[in-house]
Image (cartoon, coloured by chain):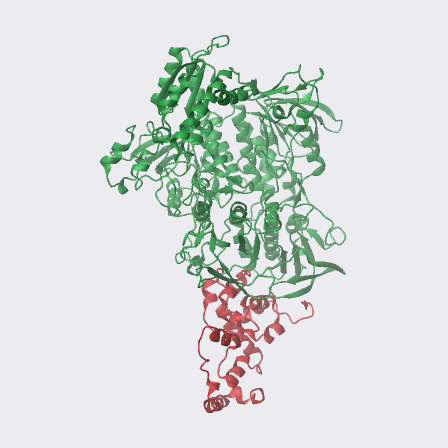
Chain colours: A green, B red
Amino acid sequence: MTHPETSKTPGKVLVVGGGMGGIRTALDLAESGRDVVLIDRSASIGGLMTQLDRTFPTNNCDLCTLSPHLSEAGRALHIDLRTLTEVTAVSGGAGSFQVTLTTAPRHIDLDRCTACGDCLRAHPECVTFTPGLDHRAPTCMRYPRSIPQAYSIDLARCSDLEDLVACCPLGAIRPQEDPVVVQETFGAVVLSPGADVYDPTPIATLGYSLFPDVVTSLEYERILSASGPTGGKLQRPSDGSAPKKVAWLQCVGSRARRSEHGHSYCSSACCMFAIKEAIVTKERFGAQIETTIFNMDIRTSGKGYEAYYQRAKDESGIRFVRCRTQNLTASADGALALRYLPEDQDAFLTENFDMVVLSTGFVVGPRLRELADIFGVDTNDHGFARTDSFHPVSTSRDGVFVAGLFEGPKDIPETMVQGSAAACMATGLVPAAAPRPSDEDLPPERDVTGEPLRVGVFVCECGENIGGVLDVQSLVDHAGRLTDVVLSENVGYGCSAESMEHIRATIAREGLNRVLIGGCSPRTHLARFQDLLRRAGINRYLVDIANLRDQDAWVHRTSPELATAKGRDLLSMGVAAARQARPLADHTLPMSQQVLVVGGGVAGMSAALALAERGLRVHLVEREARLGGEALKLRRTLEGEDVRAGVKVLVEATEAQDLIQVHTSAIIVDHSGLPGKLKTGMQVGPQLFYRQIEHGATVLATGAMANRPSLYLLGQHEAVSTQHDMESLLEEEPTQVLGWSKVVMIQCVGSRTPENPDCSRICCQSAVKNALRILRINPQARIWVLYRDLRTLGMQENAYAQARQQGVMFVRYDPGSPPQVEADGEALRVVFHDPILGDDIGLRADRVLLSTGMVPDEEAAEELARIFRLPRTQEGYLLEDHRKLRPVDLPTMGYYVAGTAASPKSIKESIAQAQAAASRVQTLLARGAINLGAAVARVDSSRCAACLVCVRACPYDVPFINADGASQIDPALCHGCGVCAAECPAKAISLQQFDDEQILAKLEGLFERRTA
Amino acid sequence: MIDLEQAEVIPDMWREVFESEDIRFCFNCGSCISVCPASNADPPLLIRRLARMVLLGLEDELLDEDTPWSCVSCSKCEEVCPMGVRPFELGLAIRRWQVRNDETRIPPSLVELYKEGYTQPVSRALETRAAVGLGELPTIDKDPELLKAYQKMLMATDVVSNNDYMFKG
């Protein structure tokens, strides 16, 4: 093991900020065996994302995608979660930081609070559950599934302290609490505190403080959200009416040179969230609602985002108007009037809207500036933590890493990537902790097969939640009369520590072998009760939950008698299902601790190095004869960094690293095995020698290719070249550049087209970069950039402003009438339409540079995807498991993607994703063995007719027909989705844990009383 | 079509017109024209279009432009411009540049002033006034005697008397 020399005792990692990025970091660290203290200054973790209604591009509800992550964070053994906590002082250095943490009082005992809500009902003034429109208001339980699942009290707002304390049935309210200050030592720190949202009040013309129906995008999210102030109804703040016309104004507070208008950079995420809000508005509240997005450029350059934008335009009927209008007035009928001139038209329009949404972006406020000061990390002019292209998550202070918005404006997938990357960097300083003893404390598991059924039913009252609506005693009596039930009782708050212990002891004492909990949702609580059963000495799959709270008491609050009747039915069904429950074994497999990294470019080398430096053996396979990939052709980043020097450092480090075995001129030819135990064969060198390696995880860093479409005389005229070609020419042949008096750059050549729908993401910054480089050599050159939407995200926007300042002309073109380029001797004649001038412009250019972007390497990518059985997007890039929340994991466990193999991205983004992939690999291999869960499909081969229905239906291509002519499903590959079980016409397939007998038993449990 | 190889193009014209590089930051966002009252004029004053002409160095086209003279000096554009281009100052600078570069140039608003007694085209405003019940616009041309005296006064200035052919008839 070659861990960098740090303290011999395992340390801890401090993660500051429990938003999406911080949760990802903490989970990755915990899964790779590191102890983590995760702090957040609010009362619950989740950050900004929990306030959103839905996320792009899937338009899913965030709470559903986020909750499992949050409960994971709440459950993980290695994570010490401390809310209401801030860092107040730091000393020491990498490997040993002394950090002072100050925790504000919650005034609620977390061990006792069950989030029953009694205090909220008695004292809504100081305990609020639903966040108001104003996201800055002191909210306590910010969203319905918050972690920790507990309220907090704002004592200053409390009118009757004595009564508040008395109203809690569990005595959890603690008015006397004081702030707690502790000093602890951490090996590494990850800063993921997020950012603040721009407050548009200073831009008086936009009327934010004047008109109630002018709201920020975050407030609009709250209005759309089911957990928001309107309960998910679209209502105007002024009069509660449903708006018929809604306008979004983009770039409010962003892309401004004057501080009165905000900050100079682009906030990067606002275009997508405005489009999402407009789509959701139409989808949920009626397609007839008119939605208009006023913008300067639409910046949808993430993976799949361009298609989302086009769908919004063509299918959802969202109108996009190019004008940053600031003419907003109130019209007589209470509407808001906007006056504007679309860029491509010549007549002004004045139009009334019922609501105006200001797309406000991200800023670093005083609180975060103070945090940066406390840690002594360098920040840029705007307060964001400074990083560089080759160290994308490392701050200026050794041992302090950064993820998410605090590193610069970005959206959720990039935040998730940085969260994992920061975890990877932190693991270099903090060795894994010793395994937790808790596993060994478990009593032996009793074999219940053959025992007569002994069902125990435990019904939760959950304060008013269930007990206030249902007649719990009658439910307990009813359950007690059901077949095989030997014990039925009311356990009050079933999930409180006290009741859990009572249930555990009862199971052991009474020799119960099936358990039914009448309580809340299995989604949040099943795992807790499964763990409880295991602690009680019986198999974890012998428990079921009847959802009396979420699906009964909460939804039928107004008809308690009918609700109690339904409760009886739910318990009957639950007991029937519990009687059918069988002990199941989780499938496990030992793992190989070697890693295969495919692709020896910047991403592949970065991933290999990160893994090897953390003690894992890596096979790095590159099809070319040398390492370096596409980056070998690059010279400078937009920020001016020397790419060649950076790549050289990577190549030398990779070749010097003992734990990395580099296979160049190697082509992968076969691949088999199960995740954790894989075998990959390749042919190496000119003689094509065959070699096979065994590995536990696979990182795909196979890159993409520079695009070279035959457009605008590329390849036919010497003066036409790509931006890519400029990289070396600008460094090596400056005299050629001195001869250019006019240069025209054309953007989106071969990108954002029907053949290659996505935006190539890097071309706008390349054009700006090369324009500035040309001007540095030849300040007299006149440069035109012909673009569709200028997409300089984040701080790149400053370079766009710099290019304009130096005289580069930016002219928009319409893809319907693209620029015309014709040969004119050694030069080129270029004609294009200037919408601002309202006229065509013709000129003689000495050089035409095409921004051609990237395309997947079709041949190699198709072959590799086939060999590794990995799905690809329509464009041909590898498709990740979840675009938003799992941007590094591929759909099959144990496969990860890094760099441009996933989508076009910069060097910085590629390296971040490579480090993230290394982190994900560590989390997998740290398990030692794979637990595949128990919910897998099983085939009864005696009933199988080999009809191939399962083979066709499986979304993961797992079933196949084996030598005996029957379907075979590998439990290690099965995702447990149940599609095959549902489709099998012979009922030969059953899904363990959810088999037909159990579901039918539930139905019988429901109907037997009625038919009897 | 404007052929930059044929037209009179002065690459650094923006320096001649405007004293600062603020103009080069313009990214055509449309803020200025969205709030500009003179964008209601006919033809409209489109300050970002003028900025583009200055930046391209289109000398002839810019000299021919009458719209800078429609500006009513409200300075709203100055307030809303996120890029600090200072469009209002730019409009005034263009007027000065036009006069510097064309001694015979008579601003159209001066002719309006002579003939009607006011500088801004008001035909659209008249309808709006009537629609909301406001009385007739109290302009000087309602009193022929006063207008005559006013014109006599203007004729006493050099710029009008030297070009009197433009004002008579």
Looking at the image, which residue is at 72% across and 23% down? A690
- Locate residue B88, reporting x and y percent: 48, 69
> Is residue A929 visible to us here?
no
> Residue at left 44%, top 12%?
A454
Q: Nearer the viewer, residue A743 or A193?
A: A193
Residue A557 picture location, percent across and down? 39, 34
Residue A643: name its quadrant.
top right
- State left or right for residue A775 relative to residue A503: right
Q: Tell me which corner region of the image, top left, top right, bottom left or bottom right, holds residue A36.
A: top left
Q: Residue at x 50, y 22 (%)?
A: A1007
Q: Is residue B120 above or below residue B150?
A: above
Residue A820 in the image, given as x and y percentages of width and height: 71, 59
- Along the viewing direction, whichever of B166 and A116 lies nearer the viewer: A116
In the shown orientation, is residue A788 left or right of residue A535?
right
Could you say which is closer to the camera, residue A514 or residue A385?
A514
Q: Closer to the camera, A696 or B131?
A: B131
Q: Residue furthest front?
A: A1012
Q: Report x, y in % for residue A325.
A: 51, 60
